[in-house]
Image (cartoon, rainbow, N blue to C red):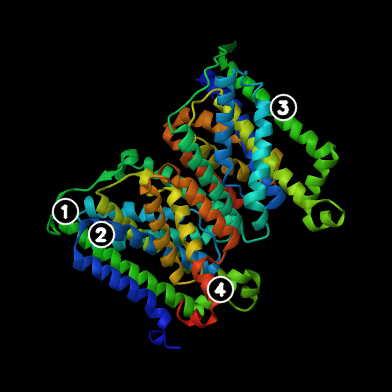
Amino acid sequence: MKFWRQTGFWLPLVLVFLWGGAVLVLRQDTIRETAFTVLMFMALASSLNILLGYTGYVSFGHIVFFGLGGYTGFYLLSEQGWPLYLAAVGGGALSGLIALLVGLAVLRLRGAYFALATIGINEAARAFVSNFGPFGGATGMFVNFSAYEKYGGAGQALWTTFTFLWITTLVVLVVSYLVKHSRFGLGLQAIREDEDAAMVMGVHAPRAKTITYVISAFFPGIIGTLYFFKNGNVEPGDAFQLHMSIEMLVMVMLGGMGTVLGPMVGATAYQGLRGYLLTSPIFKDLHLAVAGLILLLIILFVPAGAVGWVRGRIPALRKVLE
Amino acid sequence: MFSQLASSLTDGLLLGFVYGVAAMGLTLIWGVMSVINLAHGPVIALGMFATYLMFTLLGVNPYLALVPVAFFGLLMGFVIYGVAVHRVINAPHLSSLLATFAVNMIIIGLGTAIFSTSPQNIDFPLGSLEIGFLTIPVTRLLATAGAVLFTAALYLFLYFTRTGKAVRAVANNRRAAELMGIPSSLVLALSFGLGTMLAAVAGGLIATFFPFTILSGGPYELKSFVICVLGGLGNPLGALLGGLILGGLEGLIPTFMPVSWVPVVEFGLFVLVLLVKPSGLLGAK
């Protein structure tokens, strides 16, 4: 199967490409900010999906890689004067490295024990960074304004950051598709269904899980750097929000886990809903409760998510909606 | 030096009993139905507010208020179980985690709208007791007594009543228990209710000495995770021991290093125990 001949491969890419391209052509700041948030969550949810959807391992504290990578990238960029793309890749590489070390130990745990351990790692990382001198401790770091000058001032720098994020999102989607349809991905899906049986059939489960964990940690590190560079500061409270971690899970569930398109749909729908609830006069005080109620209804009645539901109902679309 | 150590250790241990009660609720639910209740924190916060409202509006003594608060917690548990958990009890872990998290969002959302997030406190000072060089606030002592009382009651219930035996039977093997004629759905609902009851009581006890908001349950929920893992998930006695260990650590660590390092040690220990001995300190090899 040549992947570049598949509609399912091109559909998410073309959507994101056109949308990001339209934002770059329109060049309006408000549109860019909205698009930045949605693209960011799309990429985060998709990278979480590579672990969660394909191997079935529930990483509850996945935001730790966003935070640690973001901190590292921010440090390299602001204190060491690295260019943005190098710093972002540096942040991603550190996240990947940490995932490798942590994964070797933690991935032996299964089910809820793994989920709990990832929460613990996130909290431990937050507490550690709050005490870590070079990263500014509890107050965090602020961007060195000279860093913006390389990109033609603060306004231009935001557009550069957006372009980087757009490209990163496209790369995440390509990787997600390739992993799903490779021999390696089939091994992962076998692990998801029954890990012991997969090992008996010759899947090298510990190695496959660790590689997947590293892949799904690498991209949040890059995205973290871009996000905190855009914000101009980074602090422990923002970087390691357990809440955001769970929102990523919600987006994956909403769209359908184990599909390439699902996290994209989920992120867009969730952000759209949140934007509506926050601004609507009736729901603005109750936005969290309403979001919770919708989440509960989806978990109880549509556990396969939007894309999974459509795929189940209309077999003809299975080739298109990967 | 010694007297300072002893007094901070006592302080921590007394708090540890209350942590233990909160964690026991979480561990009971896990032990019976393998569900991690992410709505645990908000229920703790609701326990705080229930005590607070009864104290300020009706003038009920906060310690007497624990009895209605316990009933309220039990009822909350029935409702949460029926609405959110029952349908996903046999689904993969992610479903029950997210279902209880959805309940968490609903409670926090409603609570924020009703109570706002400004801190409240129960103004019910009882002075403090001097024993040798130790000075112990009476509220802490009473909270510890309450915690011990509820633990003892739970133990007696689980080991010496027919219903308690049914709970243990379902925890052991749900299908076999059903074959013996135990109505497992009812028992599961009851166990969930007992878990949230303990959470609400722990909240009520904490409210007598710390100020709180609707978001205050979160940190105690995280502490409960640490405690449950220390004592072994699903082991109520282990939860009490874990609570004491955590309380003791929280008392002792600040005498050696800055307070901000406490969570680093706690969560580091948590991950370490999960990796080295996932069955907990009291667990079998």
Determine the chain carrying the residue at label 4.
Answer: A
What residue appears at the point 54 percent right and 33 percent down from the top-left corner?
Answer: B249
Q: Which mark is residue B149?
A: 3
Q: Residues within 10 Å of mark 2 (few under 14, many from 20)?
A: few
What residue appears at the point 46 percent right and 37 percent down from the top-left corner?
Answer: B112
Q: Which mark is residue A189?
A: 4
Q: Which mark is residue B168?
A: none
Q: Which mark is residue A31?
A: 2
Q: Quadrant of residue B24?
A: top right
Q: Amino acid at mark 4?
A: Gln
What residue appears at the point 39 percent right and 62 percent down from the top-left corner?
Answer: A268
For the question of whether residue B87 can be seen, the reply is yes
Mark 2 vs mark 3: give the one in front: 2
Q: Which mark is residue A154?
A: 1
Q: In the structure shown, which secondary structural element does the residue marked by tag 1 occupy? A: helix
N-terminal label among 4 and 1: 1
N-terminal label among 2 and 1: 2
Q: Amino acid at mark 2?
A: Ile
Q: Quadrant of residue A261?
A: bottom left
Instruction: Give how far apart the Cα atoms at labels 4 and 3 are.
Output: 49 Å
Instruction: Give how far apart the Cα atoms at labels 2 and 3 are.
Output: 59 Å
A209 with respect to A33 (left or right): right
Q: In the structure shown, which secondary structural element does the residue marked by tag 2 occupy? A: helix
